[in-house]
Image (cartoon, rainbow, N blue to C red):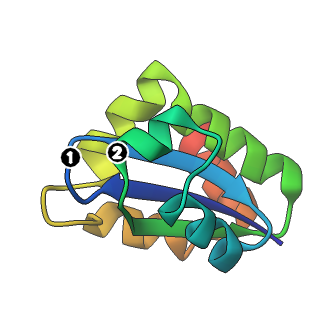
Amino acid sequence: MKYVYILRSILHPDKFYIGLTDNLERRLKQHQNPSKSAYTRRFAPWRLETHVCFTDDKVAARFETYLKSHSGRAFLKKRLITGEGVTDSFKKAKSLSNNDLAFFIFY
């Protein structure tokens, strides 16, 4: 099982971090005490905005790559994340199966 997750900086709410992991709890703890990444260290502390769970590792990796692209970031800001948190359209996307979500994002 893989998780694509989106973090938002608490001190800099316009800064996001998009990641992929197989252990969400462990990875969130690592982001709160960053030692390697200058980006996560600079904008810490972080809060989890949302995450999507995938059973297919390749679909998870494609979704993460998409969200990190220019069009994916625009999609993220316009459709997934609002000033208050996760939008209704993303709540709907989270309820789709892996194949449906891949279609929703990539086609």
For the N terminus, the image quarter is: bottom right
The furthest residue to the left: 83
Q: Is residue 82 above or below residue 2?
A: above
Position of residue 55 measured from the top left corner of the image (x, y, whole percent): 83, 69
Question: At 86% across and 61% down in the image, what residue appears?
Answer: 56
Quarter-of-image position of residue 26:
bottom right
Which residue is nearer to you in this view: 18 or 90? 18
Indicate the secondary structure of the residue bearing disc 2: helix
Classed neighbour count for the residue bearing mark 2: other residues with Cα under 10 Å, few (<14), some (14–19), many (≥20): some
Labelled pair 1, 2 in contact (Cβ < 8 Å):
yes
Which residue is nearer to you in this view: 4 or 54? 4
Quarter-of-image position of residue 3:
bottom right
Classed neighbour count for the residue bearing mark 1: other residues with Cα under 10 Å, few (<14), some (14–19), many (≥20): few
Q: Amino acid at mark 1?
A: His
Position of residue 71 measured from the top left corner of the image (x, y, whole percent): 43, 24
Position of residue 21 measured from the top left corner of the image (x, y, whole percent): 74, 60
Q: Which of the two discs, 1 and 2, labels the residue nearer the N terminus? A: 1
For the C terminus, the image quarter is: top right
Q: Is residue 46 above or below residue 14?
A: below
Where does label 1 land, which residue?
12
Q: Amino acid at mark 2?
A: Phe
Where does label 2 land, which residue?
43
